[in-house]
Image (cartoon, rainbow, N blue to C red):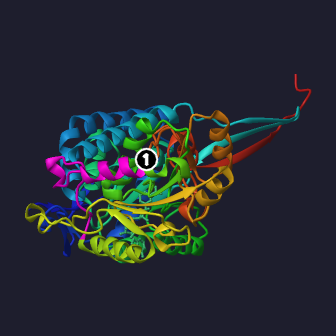
Amino acid sequence: MNRYPALINGEEVNAGASFEDIDPSTGEVLAEVTRGGPQEINDAVAAARQALEGTWRRTRPAERARILRRMSDLMRRDRDRLADLESRDTGKPLRQARADADVAIRYFEFYAGAVEVLYGETIPVSSDVFIYTLREPFGVTGHIIPWNYPLQIGARTVAPALAAGNCCVLKPAEEAPLTAVHLGRIGLEAGLPPGALNVVPGYGEEAGAALAAHPGIDHLSFTGSVEVGALVSKAAADHVIPVTLELGGKSPNLVFADADLGAALPVVVNSIIQNAGQTCSAGSRLLVQAPIHDQLMDEMTARFQKISLGPGPADPDMGPLISATQLERVARYVDLGKSEAHAVAGGGPPDDARLKGGFFFLPTVFDDVPPSAVIAREEIFGPVVAVTSFSDLDEAAQLANGTDFGLVAAVWTRNVSTAHVMAREIRAGQVFVNTYGASGGPEMPFGGVKRSGHGREKGFQGLLEYTQVKTVAMKIELGVA
Ligand code: NAD
């Protein structure tokens, strides 16, 4: 049995306590992992502060970029290993885990490039004062990430923070901590100073809460549920530090009657089965214009019935849910949904002896879902899509905006004006037209409105979020020879 340590100050730390990391495809123990708590968080924050003041804050951007590029090279070397580990730890199909590894690699490349073109401004107020701005790191940044895309989200949050000159403490989720530890090891191999990137696995209410409340943290990035995001936000407020919140979603695909259904259907289906629906930007609502409702439902249901289920490393269409707890949660929502709407596909765990022990659930479609239904409003975080019809643009916009969330939306239409009107009217951080990028590549700013959170990660904007602006005004003595 592998034991996974914490990484603090460049050292592998095996604290006394540990926890069992469960393989969601089998329900068996995959690894023993060091259970970090307040002491390990404290040590990690101290190590990060030391690395920051020692060298990292003053390292030239080109030097930081060189180390981040080396990290991306080493990740590419380890790509298959990382993908295999991620697939086992989260249960996601191997193909998806490989795609995640590729995106994680890209974050390091992207931010290595971006930091070399991160400039301040000069502000021409008057000829006797020279005013300029500096973009400085916050200092020690805390990063709390979820279990659904640990490698991708870990990379997306620490790569820009390191690039900007911060030193990090990363707390992965207890359900899937393994690739975060590997990422920390790669950082050391690539030449990050000890303490620049610390990784402390542990339970949310122990290690996570200790990190959020630590007075030595200068900026927090949290990706996870709305409930815990609110707790982290309160802890950050106590120390008056900024926090980026990447929270949940109830993202709609809006399919208009003039859409190219052949193009839309596979993408709409994938947007909800990807990672078994455990994606913040999952297309968990399907809003369809009434004249094409029946055709779309027939074709979609047929596709859902063909989706193969299996352990992640066997690379099926869809893997298991992450845990027994998540399975219970999804089953509870689906039972409730049966009293609110019609289940036309799925509706429970598969009846398949090969999948016994794993946390599998059939991809499920609910039709004729009233917008007021719980399954139309709350994030289920499973392979469950709620279908509702609309008649015109106004109703489409109203339905799209009718939840507390606003992360992603997609509009499927051949009419350019419909696309523009909807892109403007929908309240979400990202709107796709005739595609659904599930948050897109590293270049595209990503984040939510309303209860989906605030602040942006990814893209150049993601780098700016890890810097703060200092303004310098310098009086010039005019008339000096
Ligand atoms: P979660 O909120 O339960 O856990 C997220 C992280 O917070 C984990 O590392 C956990 O250990 C930690 N945590 C738990 N309790 C804590 C506490 N009291 N103090 C500090 N940290 C604590 O979320 P989850 O179940 O891991 O992930 C699912 C949620 O994440 C969904 O709502 C999903 O939409 C959201 N998510 C959002 C994005 C995004 O980018 N917007 C991406 C992925 C997931």
- Residue drawn at x 19%, y 55% is 309
- The quarter of the rendered structure image containing the C terminus is top right
Instruction: Indicate the position of residue 152 as horizontal and vertical percent values.
Output: 36, 48
Compared with 167, 250 (above or below) is: below
Q: Quadrant of residue 334?
A: bottom left
Task: Find the residue positioned furthest to the top.
Answer: 481
Instruction: Indicate the position of residue 329 as horizontal and vertical percent values.
Output: 34, 74
The residue closer to the viewer here, 432 or 267, is: 267
Marker count (numbered): 1
Magenta stretch containing residue 302, yes or no? yes
The residue closer to the viewer here, 22 or 123, is: 22
Magenta stretch containing residue 310, yes or no? yes
- Residue drawn at x 35%, y 67% is 43
Compared with 187, 121 (above or below) is: above
Question: Which residue is labeled 1 in the image?
Answer: 295
Q: Quadrant of residue 146?
A: bottom left
The residue closer to the viewer here, 34 or 45, is: 34
Q: Identify the secondary structure beneath mark 1.
A: helix
Instruction: Indicate the position of residue 52 as horizontal and vertical percent values.
Output: 45, 52
Relative to 426, 25 lies left or right: left
Q: Amino acid at mark 1?
A: Gln
- The quarter of the rendered structure image containing the N terminus is bottom left
- Residue drawn at x 71%, y 36% is 121
Relative to 86, 129 lies left or right: right
Q: Is mark 1 within 8 Å of ligand 1?
A: no
The residue closer to the viewer here, 312 or 191, is: 312
Compared with 473, 41 (above or below) is: below
- Residue drawn at x 33%, y 55% is 150
Which quadrant of the frame does ligand 1 lie within?
bottom left
Numbered range of the magenta stretch: 297-323
